[in-house]
Structures are given as C-alpha cells and as structure tokens.
Image (cartoon, grey):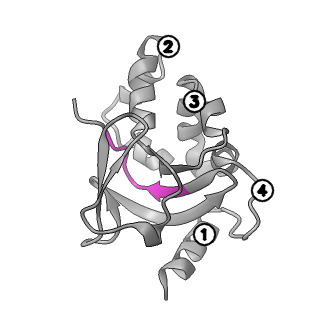
Amino acid sequence: MNILKKALVSATLLGFAATPAFAADIVDTAAGNDDFTTLVAAVKAAGLVETLKGDGPFTVFAPTNEAFAALPAGTLEDLLKPENKDKLTAILTYHVVPGKVMSTDLKDDMKAATAQGGEVTIDLDNGPMVNDAKVISADIETDNGVIHVIDKVILPSG
C-alpha cells in the first residue's frame, strides 16, 4: 500500500474526512476530532488559536490526547495555568513548522526549523519519526497547511 493510501486510511480511521476539498483550517480540523481535545485546549490556553487559523501555511505535528496523558503526572495541569503560558506556547510552537511539509517532502535525518525557534529531526529509518515521536497518521490537509499526528509530545531542549 503506498504512503498516500496509508495516510488516507489512517486519516479515515482517526475520524478525519479524507477528501480532497479543504473545508477547515488546522484548528477547526483538530477541534473536529475527539483525539485532539487536549491539544485544542492547550492551543486556546496559549492564545494560539488566531495564529493557527491564519493564512499559513503551517505544518503541525499534532500530539493525541494519549500523548499528552503520557506526560509526567501534573505536567499538563501546570502548563495550562495562566502563569505558564510562555512555556506552553514554546512547547506548542515547537510542534509547528512554517510552510506545508508533506510526508513526500521528508528526507531521512533532515532538520526542520520550528516556529518556536528550535529544530526537529526527521528519522525515516524506523518509520517516520519527529525527534522521538512516531508519526501515526500523515498528510491530513487543511486549508492552511497540513497535520501529521504523533504519539508523543515533543519538547524543545533547554
């Protein structure tokens, strides 16, 4: 099965509409899927809704609710507090790469600059990975970019 067909099957299994017509931006697409309630809540708490509803294009490596739940106990609750907005914003923008990067654009060991200012590393040797997070569904197109679903929250160094 080719990678596009796999992405469409994965997108369909995750509840995304796998249609060529783009009807929603990144935020609305994530909000329309029950696997991203935590991500959407975090985007709202960080004040990033309008940014991610903007023209873009953006590539978002989107952690699932399970990925957020796997953080150490209390971490998510602390990040969602108003006094930690800057730290939450840094973590979320580390999951965003300016531009639209489809899975076919990825090269093994490539580095991609994030909106946070750091870099993520793409590994294709063990299935597609971003740093140490596995891409579990790729190429979910929106009207302002693309979402790649990951199984772990990736954290900027420092």
Characterize the local packing of mark 4: few (<14), some (14-19) or many (20 or more) Cα atoms within 10 angstroms: few
The residue mark sitting in front, 3 or 1, is 3
Name the amino acid type tagged 2. Pro
Q: Position of residue 4 (x, y in %)?
A: 54, 78
- Mark 2 or mark 1, earlier in chain: 1
Q: Relative to 61, is 138 above or below? A: below
- Mark 3 or mark 2, earlier in chain: 3
Is residue 2 shown in magenta? no
The residue located at (40%, 55%) in the rendering is: 151
Q: Which residue is mark 2?
A: 82
Q: Position of residue 75 (x, y in %)?
A: 36, 28
In magenta, the rendered stretch is: 147-155
Left or right of 49 on screen, residue 99: left
Name the amino acid type tagged 1. Leu
Name the amino acid type tagged 3. Leu
The residue mark sitting in front, 2 or 1, is 2
Pointers 3 and 2 in contact (C-beta within 8 Å):
no
Characterize the local packing of mark 2: few (<14), some (14-19) or many (20 or more) Cα atoms within 10 angstroms: few
Which picture quadrant has residue 132? bottom left
Identity of the residue furthest to the top in this view: 83
Name the amino acid type tagged 4. Ala
The residue mark sitting in front, 3 or 2, is 3
Q: Which residue is mark 3?
A: 48
Q: Which residue is mark 1?
A: 13
Pointers 3 and 1 in contact (C-beta within 8 Å):
no
The residue located at (38%, 67%) in the rendering is: 106
Q: Mark 3: which secondary structure?
A: loop
**Between marks 4 and 1, how big is the CA–CA gap?**
19 Å
- Mark 4 or mark 1, earlier in chain: 1
> What label sits on residue 23 in the rendered view?
4
**Between marks 3 and 2, how big is the CA–CA gap?**
14 Å
Residues 49 and 64: in front is 49
